[in-house]
Amino acid sequence: MDTIRDRHFYQYVHRQIPVFILLSLLPGLGYLLLGWINNIFMPAFVWYLLVVASSIWGYRLYRSFDFDSMSEKRRDRWYRQCSWFFYAFFGLWTLIFLLYAGSEENKLHYIAIFTEIGASVVASSLLAADRRLYRPTIFILMVPLIIYFALIGEWYGYVLTAFACTLTWVLLYSANSSYKLLMQANHQATHDALTGLHNRQFFIEHLQKRMNSLSESGEFSFLLLIDLDHFKTVNDSLGHDIGDRLLQSVVARLRQHVPAGTLVARLGGDEFIITGSNIASREACERASLDVSETLLAQLKETYIVEQHHLYISASIGVSIISSRSSNANSFIKEADIAMYEVKAKGRDGVFMFNEEMSERVERNLVIERLLHFALPGNEITLHFQPQLNRDEKVIGAEALVRWNNPRLGSVSPAQFIPIAEQTGLIIELGNHILETAFITLREWRDKGIRLEQLSINISMRQLTHFSFTAQVEELLNRHLDGELRQKLVFEITESIVAEDIKRVISVMNRLKALGIRFSMDDFGTGYSSLSYLNRLPLYEIKIDRDFVGALDQNDEDRALVVTILNMANILKLSIVAEGVETAAQRDFLLSHDCHIFQGYLFSQALPPAEFEAYYTGRS
């Protein structure tokens, strides 16, 4: 069948059923009356009983339709029954034509002719969305009329025969033109103009049908959400025309390498989504989804040549297994999206399948996000301070570390809630609170005789690049710290700074440096290669990541890496902090290679302010 069966098509067919019922029952009463007046009541009465029976059938079809809950097989079965209903409807009107056409003495043949022509016009108008219906129906109605005119045997009968043939052609032409316009509008509404793929709206409806089918069969299918890595770079550097051509090349590869029975759609931008065919078991479905994903990853990484540009891109693919466990198509798309971002977080160019562990983590993150909004008003956010010691193991500084203790969740790790705060924008308000608390604590410690050389505070990149960050910091400094205490502040940033607008970041750092604040590169060596930026950034200190320090006990390669970092920092005259020092052997190795400051469980964990004060006093 050449009709695209989407929601609009089924709903259109569904809406025609009561129209046809009314066009049968109400005019049928008039024909029943004419039959009684002209002594052909019994045939007309039998005919009307058939009309009533057909109307009851149509009403049941109308009531049984529910697009969202029906599987594709049930919809096809429903549609076939509707087709037979429409054929029965027009067959009955052809029957009444044949019944009345022979009553020339009562002039009923004129009414019969009008009825047949009227029914043909109705068929060409109301059934134009379905070529399979309107073509045979028009012939069912008009051919008996053509034969009737031809059998008159007079010259005017032949003229009427010619007119009837012409009218048949006009009705078919009109219905076919309407059909083409409807199909064109439907195609534009359900397809992406650039790539020719189905769009998001069509895909969600298709997925809903697939889910209903899986619910009936107990089978499984898979969903692949594909996001092109660094596609924005192509658009920004070469222009959107090249980007569009690249997308078209990507689509050509997707179409070429997806297996039969799959549907590929474009969600928008550089995101594509694929659903596979039905598979009997979940295990087989998972294997098939990973096989398809690996094939696509390999193909999408092959070189693209677009207008003499040799382009290289990769993709991140999130996988969700479709089953009957959910009735919402968007839930599976969301799962694939979450899995895809897991790939992004792990470095891109890979595949990740959504699983129960991830589901639990997502649910917990949603709870964390909701409760985090009330953490500050509820005084649930506090600071702990981990001591920093010099070569003589005297406390010369501290790192402020945020802690969140929630009545429902208990103690929540910063590794969990800080990324969520960054994603939601709560990091701005949270970061401002951390800064103010740290500033107040530093001033109070000085008043108590606790004199530190430095207090390190972690700064999120979203904080640093926020338009109001410099003004907020300056306002807090003016309110809480004098010139001497300002010189003790060290803002810790991470190597992800390289991924930002580096000129803007350097400008912000220099403005803060003018206020007396120093900067430390935290977790050095774990992220981007920032060696080329060390001379450009106004840094005072680098911190050797705890993973490097923890590996000192393992092999020579890890020790050589730490020695390289230490030598480089000394050449650049940067202070060095080793964090995560847990053993005496690690401390001794770092001491022997001129490390300046130590921080880790060998000395102390992060402490509440009062306990830090006691620790400082004990080390003095």
Image: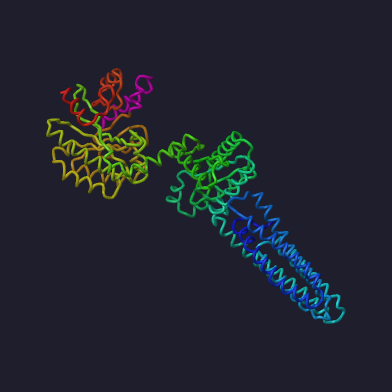
Magenta: main secondary structure equals helix
* Numbered disc total: 0
Looking at the picture, tell me which residue is in the foreground, 328 or 267.
328
Segment colored magenta: 546-574
Q: Which quadrant does the C terminus fall into?
A: top left
Q: In the image as oriented, which residue stretches furthest toward the right?
A: 153
**Nearest to the observer: residue 161 or residue 81:** 81
Residue 432 locus on image (x, y percent): 25, 43
User: Is 404 situated above or below 36?
Assistant: above
Q: Quadrant of the N terminus?
A: bottom right
Which residue is found at the position 25% from the left and 42% from the top? 433
Pinpoint residue 86: horizontal percent, then vertical percent: 71, 62
Q: Is residue 541 left or right of residue 38?
A: left
**160 left or right of 15?**
right
Question: Quadrant of residue 585 in the image?
Answer: top left
Residue 558 magenta-highlighted = yes
Residues 380 and 311: in front is: 380
Q: Is residue 575 visible?
A: no
Q: Quadrant of residue 462?
A: top left
Residue 194 drawn in magenta:
no
Q: Is residue 520 above or below residue 1?
A: above
Residue 189 location, quadrant: bottom right
User: Colour scheme used in the picture?
Assistant: rainbow
x, y percent for residue 303: 53, 43
Q: Position of residue 324 (x, y in %)?
A: 57, 42
Q: Is residue 467 above or below residue 148?
A: above
- The answer to whether residue 93 of the structure is visible from this angle is yes
Q: Residue at x 74, y 74 (%)?
A: 117
